[in-house]
Amino acid sequence: EFRRVLFRSGALWIIFSNTIFNIVIKSKYLLERIQTIKVCVYVFITSIIIYILINVFTKKSRNLSNILRKYYKEIQASFEELINEKDELKLQYDELNKKQIIITKNEERYKTALENANDAIWELDLLTKEFFCSDKFSDITGYDKNVINPIQGLSNLIAEDDRKIVENDFNNYINGKDLYYQKNMKLKLDRKS
């Protein structure tokens, strides 16, 4: 766009200045000298304009180049962060995967141990009142493990001569007097089943 403007203004300058100088100046020698000066002035002014335009374009190019470099560095830093995060996530995933394998193996071992043990194992969550016991509990006692009332029902299953000792030790554990609660006790068996 600028080249067209520069070309048209130069053409208009040459045409109109020639016409004006031909009308005003009658001496051929003086006209030739003025034409030479006019061309030199035109070339000089055009050179200055072109120089200024190149300078402006160069500054804009440098600014754009600096902005692009800045964005490139930011993108590169973000990419490196993503690569590091990806590596970190992969390590965490691998670690979780290893732990899951260990947990699965331990669960299988625990399940095998429970199935092959001659002992009944039970657990009671005092907050949720959730009761869990091994299948051996039903096999040994004859009671259906799914219908036992966790707290009162378990207490009623304990043989009379062990009940007070078991309840006392259990209360000591609950009240923080003992760190662990582990007890061997005699249970009443369900002779109906």
Image (tube, rainbow, N blue to C red):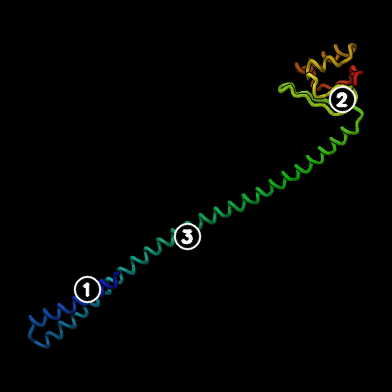
* Disc 1 target residue: 9
Whichever of labels 2 and 3 marks the residue nearer the N terminus, that label is 3
* Disc 2 target residue: 138
Tag 1 and tag 3, C-beta contact below 8 Å: no
Amino acid of disc 1: Ser
In percent of width and height, residue 70 lies at 47, 57
* Disc 3 target residue: 69
Quadrant in which the N terminus appears: bottom left
In percent of width and height, residue 122 lies at 83, 25
Give how far apart the Cα atoms at labels 1 and 2 are.
107 Å
In percent of width and height, residue 183 lies at 86, 20
Dot 2: element? helix
Circle 1 crowding by C-alpha within 10 Å: few under 14, some 14–19, many from 20: few
Amino acid of disc 2: Ser
Residue sitting at x 90%, y 11%: 161
* Of marks 1 and 3, the one in the foreground: 1
Q: How many marks?
A: 3
